[in-house]
Image (cartoon, helix red, strand yellow):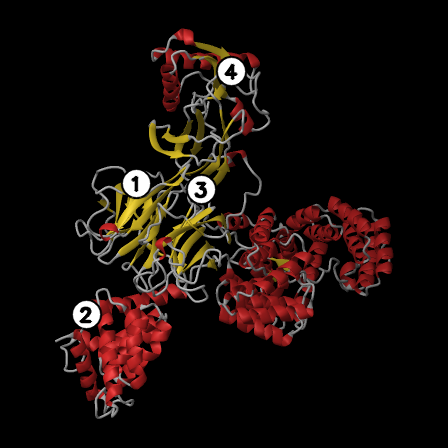
Amino acid sequence: MLKYLFLSVALLLAAFPSQAQTPTKVLPTIAKPLLVPAPAKASSLMNTNDAGQADSARVLTPTQIAEQSYQAGLLSYQNKDFAWALVNFSAAIKTAPDFAPAYGTRAATHYELKHYDQALTDYNEALKLEPNNYTNYLGRALVQEAKGNVKEAEKDYSEAMKGGFVYGPAWHKRGVLRFEKGEYQGARDDFDGAVKADRKNAYAYHDRASANQMLGNYPEAIIDYTAALTLQPGMLSALLNRAGAERHAGQLPQALKDYDTYLSIKPDDPLAFVNRGAARYENKDYKGAVTDYTQALLLDGNYALALNDRAAAYLKLRDYEKAEADATQAIALDDKYAEAYLNRGHAREMLRKPEDACKDWRKAADLGIAVGNSYAAIAGCAPAEPAPAADPTADTAKQ
Amino acid sequence: MSTYTRFLLACALATGALFTAQAQNVLFNSQRFQNEEALKGALKAIKEGQDEYNAVPPRYAAALPHFQEAQKLNPNNGPLNLRIGNCYLNMGDAATALPYLEKAAELEPAATRNHYVLGQAYQQSARWGDALKEYTKAKPVAVGAPRRGQSVDVPLPELIRRVTECKNGMQLMAKPTRLFMDNLGPTVNSPEADYNPVVTADETTLFFTSRRAGSQGGEKDPGGSGYTDDIYSTVGGGLAWGPSRNINAPVNTNGADVTVALSADGQRMLLHTEGNMGNLSETRLTAAGWSKPHELGSHINTKYQETSASFSADGRYIYYVSDKPEGSLGGKDIYKAEIDGKTPPVNLGGSINTPYNEEAVFMASDGKTLYFSSEGHNSMGGYDIFKSVYANGKWGEPENLGWPINTPSDDVFFVTVASGRIAYLASNRPGGFGGKDIYRITLLGDEKQPAINQEDRLLSTNPRPMRQVLPSVTVPVITPDVTLLKGTVTDVATMQPVFATIEVVDNLTGQTINTFQTTASGKYLLSLPAGANYALVLHNDAYLFHSENVSRPPDAGYAEAVKNIRMQKMEPGSNIVLNNVFFDPDKAVLRPESTAELDRVRKLLEDSPKLKLQVSGHTDNVGPPDANQNLSERRAQAIKDYLVQHKISADRLTATGYGGTIPITANTTEAGRQMNRRVEFKVLAR
């Protein structure tokens, strides 16, 4: 059975370099790992005599028959004839119910056909027969993820990773799951494994950079985004994100240059305008920031974040009426937008609407920006709710 | 040589530069002006103007028409342009002064004095760069030997100071103080000077000085600026102040009467009056109105000028300004003295006072923040307003309140209300009603930072933007640690106002900090710095004393509270809560802070020999009723024991415990339970 395992892994890895061969993809996705082995030469699978000729006189065992069905199934699978693949793999299983490779390959076929329940059943059976088959763990993890069972998927990716860096996709996929859960340190470690598994995998570098960015390790993030761009020069997300990392690292000129490059290629991306606006804002170019936020809003009129950030830029420009209007519109789009309440509070204070400002600061605090309460206190707003301690004549030490 | 002769000589000598300058300096002489009568008239006008100009103190407003008369004949004389410009400059009108001074410097570019005065005008216009250029031109004469025909009266230290002021101004204007500055409007401000505002701690009553028409005696100000100073008042608050009224005699007199300070409750006022070179007087608000001012003691008022003052937070001391040489660090200094004491005043020392003048001192309600004006420290010119906080036994580094509170001109007299967020000052900035006007300042604090967001498509597999969480920001909230307590004192039965004396006692020491009076309508206002356990004891001979407790930790911040108090007449059945009796938790052991309150009860019993009292203990409803009953009995008994130990006959006292059976409010909140845990006494007989 070991030969099937090695065969699967070899083909599984062969599936991944294809990612690096799609330079024009803007938003790449990791290719699904090929979970069934490619057909081997028939001669290697048939009983042969010393001269290499088929020994037709010998009677085939059920396992040998099953192997033949299995090989036929592999060919069908390769040809994307999943229906015939299923027939063949099922025939193999029927002939030899303990022929483990057929379960795994049938599971992969079900996965392709989005028959996740059947895929799961087959992977479970395959793993019963071969508990150390890491390829099947990887396959089952994909099925679990497709079914939305993130916890189970992560567990299976972890099992697959026991096979070492050779299971690079498992490292990468678990990293993604951890990243999405906000476990950036763990994600970074997993992406690190994915990079070690394949040092030509631009996506692994990209995502390790993302994890580093979320961890505040901006110089490392910049290096990894740059590596991703070197491997895949057309990877625009790496360019955009590198600009973000540069901005966070205080490298505003480099960030602005990257944003400019990105927008020269993709001038219809409101998010990029918003982020360049933020870079300009941090560069104290508030008018330039307003221009970018406005451009973002021309591309997406309901972009609450662009409205909020433009409000902030207007505050810096002391155009409090516009700041209030933008923040109000942002709140209309997202009534839980804490930063917009905070900014509107600032605008309203300067517009001599102290009570409205106080309400906005308190609301921002309620929504998680604690500094809103500090601003309210500085401005002399009435306490949010009277507390017993607010009565200075109350003496808690008394009696 | 008379100054007039020197002036004419200067006019003549200036011709030396005439032929080298681009503009021609035109002399007043018969070669130039054939009309002898006109020339004579101009020279006469110059002489008359010069007399006013050189008076001590100079009368610039009076000199100006004479100089302008001469200017009609000859607008191109350097020294005359300098004089006219200097008059305007000293009258606080740098904008009008500038063209004259620029012309003087152009006509006589070698006369470095011209550049110095022009530099001053630029400085007062906040044109720091231009001012520095002119001061640089003035410098050679200041540091080198005088040359013939050049003015030499620019002392180097003064020049250096001016340069420093300009640099200060550049720095301060680069980071303006965030505030709203609102003119109080025509109900307060008049076409004449309105200045020296003082305001109650709760910002409901404002007093100020005005030179408007209608002053007591109706005399014109000798300086030619409106009428003699009188004190006016208005009530309201914020930007809604009612009509101003002259507070009349006996406070206002035919002379100059100037507001200097107001106690937090608005019951006491300090004035600056003309007597004895300028002294400080005090007036108090009584049921009949403001009393006739009386001069403060000789330990404060001297033969020198005492010009401004402020009450300390507890009202026992004043901070004041005097130019007496004894103990001075130079010029006018700020001192502290016990207002009714005899001990010598204390100079506030080198952290506050400088070799230059200090003026217009104001102590805030928190008892530790001092505002004052100074020509020293890092002033941007003339007097600037500074703030210093007393902490750890010393005054902190004075902080310039910055632009636009401070300007290159004199900025004096800055007072705050209890919250510390609102201040009042007088200023002659453009846009007013004439002369100095009174402005209300809302201090906004440091710039409130806007919050921007960002989002990135971080994962290569996921095109969904991810919004990144902003780092948490903390902003220090600094408010004055003071409690503003106000309310009305009434008779519990009739609800009529009671005119009471309020004694503020520090429970820790048992010392009376100060006593205050309610107004005739029973209103009171107390500004109590945090960090003490206060007993407020209200007295009126016809009533039982009433005590309240206010306790706030040192960093409690700012709080306002209203406490309406009902006093009970001393008659059988009257019932008083002893709010300043303290026990150890769950015990009947009297704490030392209770002594002052118990001594008041003892004194009451001593003063009224027939008085019999029931002392009753009460608890909240927390815990077993039996335990509460027992605790309340033991506490009542502890008080009776204390009084008996202090020679009160035991048969005049009964001690009763009621446990939690007689709550005076619901036990649902800690505040309610607090009120229910109490000791009372009831008058049984008198």
**Chain for mark 2?**
B
Locate the C terminus of chain B and report the quarter of the image it occupies. Answer: top left
Q: Secondary structure at mark 1?
A: strand
**Chain for mark 3?**
B
Q: Residue at x 57, y 43 (%)?
A: A384
Q: Tell which of A286 and B318 is nearer to you.
A: B318
Q: Nearer the viewer, mark 1 or mark 4?
A: 4
- Is tag 1's residue or tag 4's residue first in the polypeptide sequence? 1
Pointer 4 local density, CA inside 10 Å: few below 14, some 14–19, many at least 20: some
Q: Indicate the position of residue B134 as horizontal and vertical percent values.
A: 28, 76
Q: In the image, what residue type sits under mark 1?
A: Tyr
- Is tag 4's residue or tag 3's residue first in the polypeptide sequence? 3
Q: In the image, what residue type sits under mark 3?
A: Gly
Find disc 2 in the rendering and name its residue. B155
Q: Residue at x 57, y 14 (%)?
A: B625
Does residue B610 lie above or below B578 as drawn?
above
Find disc 1 in the rendering and name its residue. B317
Q: Is residue A204 left or right of residue B229?
A: right
Q: Nearer the viewer, mark 2 or mark 4?
A: 4
Does residue B447 lie above or below A284 as drawn?
above
- Is tag 2's residue or tag 1's residue first in the polypeptide sequence? 2
Mark 4 and mark 3 in contact? Answer it, CB < 8 Å: no
**Chain for mark 1?**
B
